[in-house]
Amino acid sequence: MYTKQYALQQEFPETLLRTKVTIIIPSYGKGRAMVNLVRQLARDRYRNKEIIVVLDMPDSSIVKELKKYNECRVIVNASRKGKVNALNTALKYASGDLFIFLDDDVEIEDGGFVEKVIKNMAKCDIGDIKKVIKGKGLLGNLVYIEYMTFNFASKLFHKWAKRSIAVNGAAFAVWSKALREIGLFRPVISEDLDFSIRSFLAGHRFCYIDDTFVWNHAPGGWRQWLKQRKRWAIGAAMWLREYIDPLLKALKKMPHVIIPGLILILPSIFTTLLIFLLRDNMYVKSLYLLLLTLSSIIGQFLPIASLISVNLHFMFFSQFINILIVFSVLSILYIIAARNVKMKSKFYLYPIYFLVYQPLWLTILLAGFIRVYIFKKKDVEDWVI
């Protein structure tokens, strides 16, 4: 008789059905969302799992709630020791064959989440789990569009290369054997980028997991978004500086993957280059470059530099032919990408996304690169490695 259990065995090899899964969640602060996440994971249909939560300076009520779940091991740090320390501490206690790493503010609605991750990991070493932004208002929708491009870029790496130079650390999976080959997380700002490039250099097979997903929350406001992006910018600059040679080699080997992915994730790079290639508004462009340099060391200049960047884009796009060609091409690419990863396009926000959001993000990113490369400053506000 073709039973439900038999169907499961047909879908999964017997060895996968015996896979021990360790889910690792680092957390700092109150962690109310994290309690909900642990509750969702405890209810997941896959039983052969353990959950390890490492908490920095938690409320006692949070610890008490977590200890209600038998699958959950709680490790408490009385002081703030940082995300990397939390990840590596959890790995010391982990006994799983497969590790799933989750940020403490993600949400999971799929009761078969773990099972689907295992299924997708059958033929790869490291996997990036699909992330969808949950957020209200203009900022939430703009970040939603941005994360759509992250997902599409991961899918490109999966389909066309089977390897990836970058994985978003909010939700990903890796086999314990692969992790042992490259070692623990290193004490850097962007530990996920560092981990994924080391996995790439080790020749690990990559997959994009999209038949399940996690909800990510957009920053609560523009101030929080700015704080996050400053950290991302400095982390990306340090990552690029350390791994510039292998990244250039990867670009040479996989231009068909990296260039389209970069265009979608950060189209403002190419529109800004086009703007500076045109020989007009040279005084404004020079002022922008000056303020960009100053903003890398004096944060008060960053809003002014961002406004000038937005103004340059408006001046460029005010020319009818430019706006028609560039906006049409980008919009078509984004709509295709959104459909490909089964997300909403939100095309009505593309003018704001291309003309305002992207130039703002690029300005912050460039300021971070100048801060790291020229002024040799690596400090990040309110962040412990």
Image (cartoon, rainbow, N blue to C red):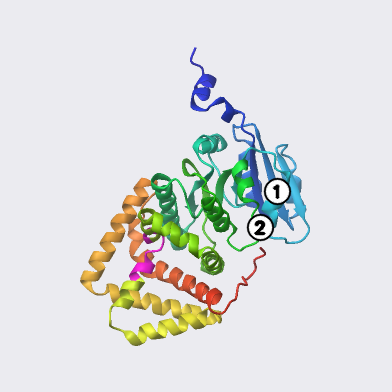
Q: Is residue 152 left or right of residue 314?
A: right
Q: Secondary structure at mark 1?
A: helix
* Residue displayed at 57% across by 44% down: 174
Q: Is residue 370 visible?
A: yes
Q: Who is closer to the viewer here, 144 or 159?
A: 159
Crowd around label 2: few <14 · some 14–19 · many ≥20 (10 Å):
many
Badge 1: residue crowd in 10 Å (few <14, some 14–19, many ≥20):
many
Front position in the image: 213 or 125: 125
* Residue under label 2: 83
Q: In the rendered structure, does residue 229 fall within the stretch colored magenta?
A: no
Q: Earlier in the sequence, mark 2 or mark 1?
A: 2
Please give left or right for residue 277 compared with residue 304 in the image. left
* Circle 1 residue: 90
Figure check: 235 above or below 180: below
Percent coordinates x, y for residue 55 in the rendering? 72, 53
Check if mark 2's residue and mark 1's residue have beta carbons within 8 Å. no
Residue 153 disc label = none
Q: Residue furthest bottom?
A: 283
Q: Type of residue at label 1?
A: Ala
x and y, in percent, of residue 172 in the image: 55, 47
Give 199 or 365, whichever is nearer the viewer.
199
Residue sitting at 26 percent across and 68 percent down? 323
Tell me, yes or no, whether the highlighted magenta stretch contains residue 266: yes
* On screen, residue 84 above or below 230: above
- Which residue is painted at 36% across and 85% down in the image? 284
- Viewer-closest of 251 and 269: 251
- Name the dominant secondary structure of the magenta segment: helix
Q: Which residues are magenta?
A: 263-271
Q: Is residue 26 left or right of residue 119?
A: right
